[in-house]
Every structure is written in structure tokens, then in C-alpha cells.
Image (spheres, helix red, strand yellow):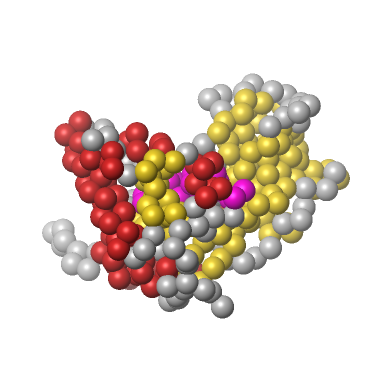
Amino acid sequence: MPQPLAPCQIAIAVRPSQRDGNRDARRDVLRDLTETVLAVAALLRSLGYTPVLEENSALELDAEIVAGLQISTMADIGQVSGLAIVLGGDGTFISVARQLAPYNVPIIGVNLGRLGFLTDLTLSNLTESLPRLLAGEYREERRVLLSVVRSLANAEQHLAVNDVVVNRGGATSLVDLEISLNDRFAYGFRADGVIVATPTGSTAYALSAGGPIMAPFVNAFTIVPIAPHALTNRPIVVADDSVIRITVARAREALASIDGHHVIALTEGDSVEIKRAADTVCLWHPLDYDYYHTLREKLGWTETPEGLAPRNPVSHR
């Protein structure tokens, strides 16, 4: 049974949208974000918690206005904070989740983006919902991560919340890839690339490429080809205890992208090993959270053509 969160340090992380290219529009966005952060900090103080602002978030906001807040690095937040509140879209949420997963810090998402598939709360319900979550009225969920290592001695390990994509980079020609599962060759194919996705990532790029939706509690990964040359090549779902190795058999250029954040250049003969990470992401949802409702509401899942049509279509004569 979830327990109320005892008084502690709670981190706030936020990222402005990079789509607001207009200088005036961006200035307005930063002002609104700064005010939002201050409002969340004030709410936390009123509830007996100590708010801290994540270091990179502070650099994005109005320095003079947020000067009164304690600033912490993500590593310090991981070691000290009892909770992290992420203000932003899915990209911001994934970035913070990837960094805090090794510290087992729970995360609450507040949607400031367009889709907000991973963020449950909104600014309009935050004042009502956040105190309930902190009082113990939440459902905890664990999301698996991918561990990604390039086939080089002493290669760095990377974590992925959504997916790992191996593709042709900027080249116009297809790449030949080979997939091995648990050190046994499974199949090879020619395509623009391939996606290995977690259940969390199954509703992201993998879904756009024709992959299946996997509920977050399913213990599996999906391997989805991107524009395969052969009509017989289809997505496959494998157990999440599988060790997946993707080898670049032939390519002019190839890249491995981890959550669209970190990119590794690959050459012919290179490979990446992908498996379930030891760390998981800890999410706190409101008690009324329903994954399938989120699919219906935010992705239009099961919507009929009639429902997708404009309610008041313009007649053309």
C-alpha cells in the first residue's frame, strides 16, 4: 500500500520547447515556464517539502526570478531527492527518467507539451492532484529500460527508455543488417534501419513504423524494421530477457540512436548489443490512471472513421 511521502527534497525539472523559434514567442514561453516553476515550488513549500530546481532547467529560465530556489545537479537530485516532478512533454520526461533511473527516484509528469503520453497531470489539475499523490494516493509503476553497448572494448553503456534505432544515417542507400538473439543468428534483411523498442517505446517511433502496441506490463521487446526491402519482413516480439545484437553487414553509413538523444556512428562489421537494463524507471500515477484510456484519448486508439471525421464538415459544391 503506498504511503504518504515524508517531508523531503523534491526536484523540479523543466525544458522549453525547441519549436518556439520566434524570439518573442520564446521569451513569452520562458516567462510562463518560470512562473509555473515558482508556482509548483510554492505549492511544495505549503505542503511541507523543500523544492530544488534541476541545474540545466535553471539555465533555461529567468535567472533573476529563480535565484531564490536551490539549484541541484541531476546526480545530487538522484542521491538526495525523494521525488522528481517533470514539467514538459514526453521528450523532457524521457530525458529525466533516463538520468534518474539508476537512483530509483520516483517521477511525476506534468504535461506542457503537445501529446503528453507519458505525463499524467496538467497545469489545470496540478493544485488538486499533486497533494493527493504526495499523501499516498498514487499507483506506482515500473518501466523497463534498454541497456545498449557498442561492440568495442570498454565501450560505454547507454540507457534507453523508448528505443534504440540503427539506421542508414544520411546515406540514401539501404543498409544490410543482421539480428542475433542470445548469440544465435536469427535473420538478416535490407532496410532503412531497425527499431528495438521497450513497451514504453512501442507507442513512439516503433508504432509509426508499423510495430505493435505493447502494454507496459508486458515482459517483451519488439524489433521493428524501417521500410524493409522484402515484403516478408515483419516486426517480431521477443522476451525481454533476450540479448539482441544488431550487426551492420553492409552500409555506406550507419548510426545507432538511443532515445533520439545519443548517436553512435557505426561502420561495416560494427554491432550494438541490446538487453534489459538492471535499472527501471519508477512512475507515480494518479489512482484513476488507465493505460488503455490514455491510448484512446491521446492516440485515438480504436477510433472509428466517423469519429475521426470533422464534426461540422464544410460542404464543397
Q: Nearer the viewer, residue 190 or 80?
A: 80
Does the magenta segment cover residue 312? Answer: no
Which residue reaches farthest left?
317
Residue positioned 74% across, 59% down in the render: 239
Q: Is residue 266 visible?
A: yes
Q: Is residue 227 visible?
A: no
Quadrant location of the N terminus in the rendered image = bottom right
Residue positioned 68% across, 44% down in the render: 147
Instruction: Give x and y (percent) for residue 148.
Output: 68, 40
Query: For this view, does 218 lie left or right of residue 209?
Result: right
Instruction: Give x and y (percent) for residue 317.
Output: 13, 59
Q: Nearer the viewer, residue 39 or 266?
A: 39
Query: For this view, does 50 lie left or right of residue 233?
Result: left
- Main secondary structure along the magenta-highlighted residues: helix
Residue positioned 28% across, 38% down in the render: 67
Instruction: Give x and y (percent) for residue 40.
Output: 30, 56
Query: For this view, does 130 lie left or right of residue 82?
Result: left
Does the magenta segment cover residue 94? Answer: yes
Residue positioned 68% across, 59% down in the render: 220
Q: Is residue 252 above or below residue 134?
A: above
Q: Is residue 200 above or below residue 294?
A: above
Which residue reaches farthest right?
184
Instruction: Give x and y (percent) for residue 263.
Output: 57, 31
- Residue numbers of the magenta segment: 87-103
For the image shown, how many numbered marks are present on the structure? 0
| Residue 219 found in image quarter | bottom right
| Residue 41 found in image quarter | bottom left
| Residue 248 found in image quarter | top right
